[in-house]
Amino acid sequence: MWKKLIVIILMLALFVWSLTLIGKPKTETSPDTPETEEENVVQVEEQLPETVYSFNLQNITPECSEDVNDMLCAVENAVKCTIKPDMENCKQLNLPTFIFMTDPTVERPTEMNYRFINKKVLPTGSTEIYTESSCNGGWFDLCQGTIIYVLGQSGGKWRVKDIYAIE
């Protein structure tokens, strides 16, 4: 009989304790909770050009349209080198190696259009530049839709470290 009574009292105590936990307001973050990278992304309210940039195999030059902004110039150079990887300055830009692939099965575009739509500064020191792009090739699905250019600094200059697409 005593055993049953002790079990009932313990069950009631557990029930009351769980009710107090339910009634406590939830805190947003505690000091011990590590922040994720997503929480550390900084939205930059920088005015990006609304221009639609168009490049094709015939009109590519090494000069940037946006010389005043090194980040936007880095993206433009990556686009130009995607179309024409043997252009004179492409090798010095330290771009991702897949841009220089020459495999015959690779559908390299000969025309690309893009416009800048967003910019995010990451806590790692990298910056993501979002573009809305279209092209006339497959190019690993990296020239149609929303394309993100991940930039980092190397030797005091911005360079494209990676490129990826989102659907």
Image (cartoon, helix red, strand yellow):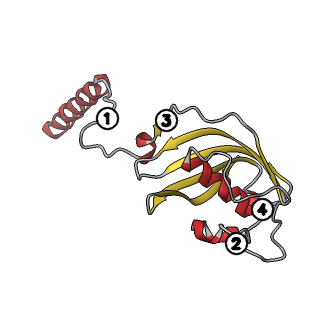
Q: Position of residue 92 (x, y in %)?
A: 59, 70
What is the CA distance from the residue labelled 2 to the residue labelled 4? 10 Å
**Relative horizontal placement of residue 17, taking residue 79 as reference (left or right):** left
Q: Alpha-carbon neighbours of circle 4 within 10 Å: few (<14), some, or many (≥20)?
A: many
Q: Alpha-carbon neighbours of circle 2 within 10 Å: few (<14), some, or many (≥20)?
A: some
The residue positioned 56% from the left and 54% from the top of the image is: 150
Disc 4: which residue: 83
Amino acid type, label 2: Phe
What is the CA distance from the residue labelled 1 to the residue labelled 4? 47 Å
Circles 4, 3 touching at the beta carbon (< 8 Å): no
What is the CA distance from the residue labelled 3 to the residue labelled 1? 20 Å
Question: Could you tell me which secondary element the residue under label 1 belongs to?
Answer: loop
Which image quarter is the N terminus in?
top left
Disc 1: which residue: 29
Q: Could you tell which of marks 2 and 1 lies nearer the N-terminus?
A: 1
What is the CA distance from the residue labelled 4 to the residue labelled 3? 30 Å
Q: Alpha-carbon neighbours of circle 3 within 10 Å: few (<14), some, or many (≥20)?
A: few
Q: Position of residue 158 (x, y in %)?
A: 51, 55
Question: Could you tell me which secondary element the residue under label 3 belongs to?
Answer: strand
Question: Could you tell me which secondary element the residue under label 4 belongs to?
Answer: helix
